[in-house]
Amino acid sequence: MIRRRSYSIIYNVQRITLLIFYSSSAIALSIPLARLVIRLSPDHLFPLVAFLVIYMVLVVVLGTLIHVISYIPFNLASAFDPIKNEIASGAISDLDQLGKRITSFTTQFFDFSFLDIAHAFIQTGQPGIISHEDLSGIHKALDDYGMIEKSKQLEEIIRAGKINLNNREYHLYILPIWFGERWLGYMGLLSEKRISRFFQKFLMEYENNFLDDQIMLVTQLSKKR
C-alpha cells in the first residue's frame, strides 16, 4: 500500500511539473508573438485581439490533449484494479457479471474530449449482447452487420459505421478481444464523435493489457464450476 501511494505521489508530481512547464511556456511564447502582431499592425487592435483569441483556443485544446495523454495510462491501471479484485474474490464469477462491470467501467472512465465512450457492450459466441444498460435497440443492426463473424477477422479496432440508439446517432467501433490466438469476442463502443487513430491505440492497449486476460480467466473459472 505504501509503495502504491509513493508511486502515485511521484506520478502526480510529474503531471504537475508538466502542467507548470506547459503553462509557463505558453505564456512566455505569447509575449513575443503578441509584440510581433502589434509591430505588423501598429494602428489596428483587431489583429491583436484575433491573435489572442486564437492563441488561447490552441493553448486550451493542446493542454486538454496533454491532460488526456498523461492521465489515461496510470489512472486506467489503478481504476481497473477493483475489477481484478472482484474476480479474485469471487464477486465476479461469470461472463455476464464481468461484461456488465466492464461496460459500466468503460463508459465512466473514457469520458474525455478526445475519447468519449457513451455506450459499450460485449458480445461473445453466445447469442445476445452483454451490457450494464439496455441496448436491445441495436440487436438488429448488429445482426445485419454480421458483427460476430466480422470481429473474428479483425486484429485491430475499426469504425464499423453509424448506428442509431434512442433517437441519437453514434459512431460504432468494434474492438476485437483476443487471448493469444483465441478469439474471445468483441467489445462494441458507441461514441458521438469520431475517435482519432491516435486514441484508438489507447483502446487497443486497453484490450490487450486489461480485457483479454480477465475475460479468459473468468471463462476458465466458469468452466470449473
Image (cartoon, rainbow, N blue to C red):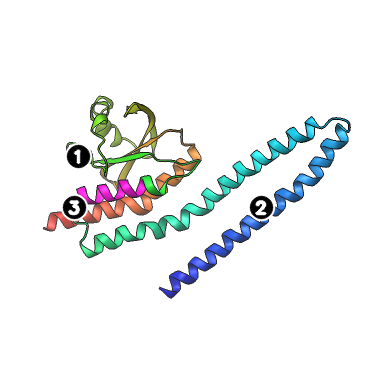
Secondary structure under badge 1? loop
Mark number displayed over residue 22: 2
Which residue bears the numbered disc 1?
A: 125
**Dot 2: within a 10 Å radius of its alpha carbon, few (fewer than 14), some, or many (20 or more) residues?**
some
Which residue is found at the position 57% from the left and 59% from the top?
15
- Residue located farthest toward the front when viewing the structure as drawn: 45
Answer above or below: position of 73 versus 191.
below
From the viewer's side, name the closer residue of 33 and 185. Answer: 33
Q: Secondary structure at mark 3?
A: loop
Residue 169 is situated, as x and y percent measured from the top left of the image, at 38, 27
Q: Please identify, in this view, whether the residue under mark 1 or under mark 3 is nearer the observer.
A: 3
For the record, the magenta segment spans 95-106
Q: Is residue 165 above or below residue 29?
A: above
* In the image, farthest residue toward the bottom: 2
Q: CA distance from mark 3 to mark 2?
A: 46 Å
Quadrant position of residue 168: top left
Residue 23 among magenta residues? no
Residue located 45% across and 44% down the image = 201
Quadrant holding the C terminus: bottom left
Dot 1 surroundings within 10 Å: few (below 14), some, or many (20 or more)? few
Badge 2 marks a residue whose secondary structure is: helix
Q: Nearer the viewer, mark 2 or mark 1?
A: 2
Nearer the observer, 139 or 206: 139
Q: CA distance from mark 2 to mark 1?
A: 48 Å
Q: How many marks?
A: 3
Residue 152's image quarter? top left
Near mark 3 (Cα within 10 A), the count class, few <14, some 14-19 or many ≥20, is some
Query: Which image quarter holds the N terminus?
Result: bottom left
The image shows residue 78, relative to residue 100, as above or below, that is below
Q: Which residue is mark 3?
A: 94
